[in-house]
Amino acid sequence: MTKIIKTQVAIVGAGPSGLLLGQLLSKAGIDNVIIERQAQEYVLARIRAGVLEQGTVDLLNEAGVSTRLYKEGLIHHGFDIAFNQIQLHIDLEKLTNGKHVTVYGQTEVTKDLTQARINANLPIFYSAEDVQVTDVLSPSPKVSFTLAGQSYQIESDYIAGCDGYHGVCRASIPRSSIQEFERVYPFGWLGILSDTPPVQEELIYGNHPDGFYLCSMRSHTRSRYYLQCTLDDDIKNWSDERFWDNLQSRLPLPLANQLVRGPSIEKSIAPLRSFVAEPLKYGQLFLAGDAGHIVPPTGAKGLNLAASDVFYLSKALKAKYLDHDTMLIDDYSSTALKRIWKAERFSWWLTNMLHHFPEKSSFDQRIQQAEFDYLCSSEQAQKALAENYVGLPY
């Protein structure tokens, strides 16, 4: 027999966007249930980005999950861009009238949000199988699934699809009712996590003849490094020693000399793509986060875009339930997409300036160099970069 559960908002996906939306709605007194197809241990172990815009930090504070973030997060007042041996410092606070970013891993954000939901005894179903979304054009859309042999059906007013790029929510929208825009990049990022001090206190994005690199961190003692690699590369080809050798050879000499090596505790290869689905609303179903868009990680916009979606969606649902106003719900897709496309543009631009494309000609390489030279010589160009990096206003 199927167990029926009634709620106001059914949220599919227990990543940061689904958990943050659930937390904000619950604090406003709006009932919600979260359904996640993966096990809790898997969700909490996923290694993801870690640079938070101020808007994301403010939203996590509003959700009541910022205690550990404020205690352990690293405030960054700027970052570097390097071309070969030349480093350009982008002073975020100077260029944006005092704004900055906070380094705090997405894994930690997920842990904080998960613990808050557990502490509040709010419903969340992990390891859900055969998840299906139905009746989204009706006043009572449904999410059905099985768990430990028991069939469930969640009956709701709205469904929030926060289940990622490969989730069921976007796939449940008829192809004739959605348009997808995509650019797949011809390379990936090889990343490692190591318990070593960062090579410097702030991030470094680098363009080198051997390819892009990024020096990031999770704390004062844990570093996250990336190297551009081919899409057909295999993680087995990359010993720790080979990774460190390649990274050290790409760094400007002063930094190369102070790089601290150590055993990797996580190593993976991630493809890069730009992707947007339009619209983000179909009937009573909304898409948020990676379910509706993907950005290349250059510029750290993925998690922050998910947070801005949640900002718009939570505000719209609160207006509906608390003020009986549906205008923001009707406008959710168009409002969110305006900010999404600006972030897509920024991530695409930074990716093009910093990476080596197999098909690029010598002319294209000169354009890359000219982009960097222009940044070095123009404070206005640096201001535009900094404005986008700290996060455009909601």
Image: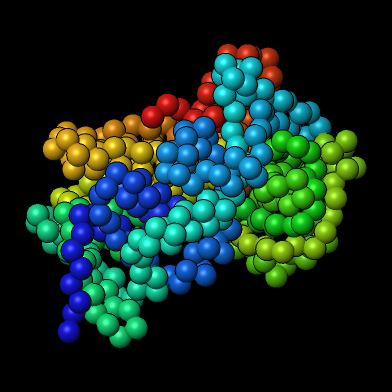
Q: Quadrant of the C terminus?
A: top left
Q: Picture coordinates of residue 214 (x, y %)?
A: 69, 44
Number of marks in picture: 0
Q: Is residue 129 above or below residue 186?
A: below
Q: Is residue 377 visible?
A: yes
Is residue 344 shown left or right of residue 124? right
Q: Picture coordinates of residue 195 (x, y %)?
A: 77, 56
Residue furthest to the right: 257
Q: Picture coordinates of residue 208 (x, y %)?
A: 74, 40
Question: Toward the viewer: 196 or 252?
Answer: 196
Question: Toward the viewer: 275 or 184?
Answer: 275
Question: Toward the viewer: 105 or 361?
Answer: 105
Q: Is residue 182 above or below residue 168?
A: above
The residue sitting at 53% across, 57% down in the picture is 111
Q: Is residue 213 visible?
A: no
Q: Picture coordinates of residue 309 (x, y %)?
A: 36, 41
Q: Is residue 237 above or below residue 338?
A: below
What colouring style does the render use?
A: rainbow
